[in-house]
Image (tube, helix red, strand yellow):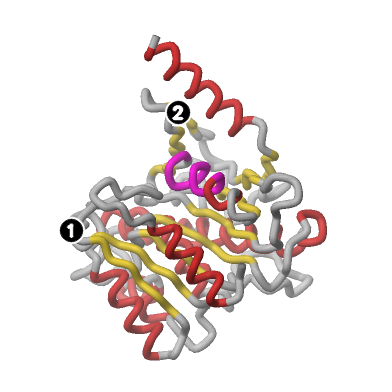
Amino acid sequence: MKKLLLAAICLQMSLTVISQEIIPLYSSVPNSKPGPDEEKMDTAANGRIGGSKVSRPTLTVFVPEAGKANGTAVVICPGGGYVHLAMTHEGYDVAKRLNSSGITCFVLKYRLPSDQIMVKKEIGPLQDAQRAIQIVREGADRWHLNKNKIGIIGFSAGGHLASTAGTHFQQVVIDNKAGTSLRPDFMILGYPVISFSDSLAHMGSRNNLVGKEASPELVNLYSNELQVTTQTPPTFLVHAKDDRTVKVENSLRFKEKLDSFHVPAEIYLYEKGGHGFGLNNSTSDVKWMDLAEAWLRKQGFL
């Protein structure tokens, strides 16, 4: 009986995801070259959906219940070390949680860097993040959004991508003839990869994005703590102190830089929880997303 119930729940979750509107990012994918289409979306035994070798980037739209939307929107970047996308617990689940608070969500299935299918693999994910923000901002009327309340959320390597979008928005790597602002209005970063420095980097993410032989200049460019300015969006960070995959110093260093430029920022640190806990850290009763929402409200985004 329990197995049947679990199967029914997993089926319902899959149907819920399938029923969402899915928007291709491009009619013709930029920065691409002929190569194999090996994109895969798999469902694990626990019902979680994951993506690999992504070459067809999309946005999956999650709209709040009728009458509940408040005009705020977020682009959500799942993590996975720039080699995988944890679409469920760092994507769809987050969208559903934020929908309950009236936030319209767009889960980004971004291209994973590959020399096989990209001319410059280090800009591929950023192109997709910028294009996602562009689509959401230019479609604000369609989704009844406030153009000045469009943020970005990212986890792990998705946190690196989100923080890259928030610190490299003046480095426009997509077609943007209309001059649409590509700056996220706020960032929420969950156990993010921030730095590519030797002492702090999650080397898998670094090597997958910029390559094992990356120049010091390229490593510094994508060490996002070095790219903070007074124009960097307000940021909320969450991390566990015992994270052995992405050192907590990534978040601490970013927070220090934000403070030095007087950018509004807040951080919540769990004593335990490791890496990849998504919305729910099982070692604590504290629900960090509740804290993030309170911060958003204080900043005027809710």
Q: Is 189 situated left or right of 215 in this image?
A: right
The foreground one among 38 and 100 is 100
Q: Residue 213 location in percent, x, y?
A: 28, 62
In reply to whether residue 295 is colored magenta, the answer given is no
Q: Residue 301 is drawn in which quadrant? A: bottom right
The residue to which callout 2 is attached is 42
Which disc is residue 242 wearing? Answer: 1
Identified at 43% across, 82% down, the residue is 228
Magenta residues, start to end: 88-96
Query: Count the marks: how many?
Result: 2
Q: Is 137 situated left or right of 211 in this image?
A: right
Q: Report, in whole angstroms, how far the alpha carbon at label 2 lies from the one at label 1.
A: 29 Å
In reply to whether residue 89 is colored magenta, the answer given is yes
Identified at 37% across, 23% down, the residue is 45
Q: Main secondary structure of the magenta part?
A: helix
Q: Residue 1 is drawn in which quadrant? A: top left
The foreground one among 271 and 223 is 271
Q: Is residue 128 above or below residue 11?
A: below
Q: Is residue 45 above or below residue 134?
A: above
Q: Secondary structure at mark 1?
A: loop
* Kind of residue at badge 1: Asp
The foreground one among 250 and 10 is 10
Q: Residue furthest right?
A: 141
Q: Residue 183 location in percent, x, y?
A: 60, 73
Q: Residue 14 location in percent, x, y?
A: 55, 27
* Kind of residue at badge 2: Asp
Q: Residue 207 is drawn in which quadrant? A: bottom left
Visible residue check, residue 79: yes
Q: Is residue 279 above or below residue 241?
A: above
Q: Residue 129 location in percent, x, y?
A: 56, 59
Q: Residue furthest front?
A: 285
Visible residue check, residue 53: no
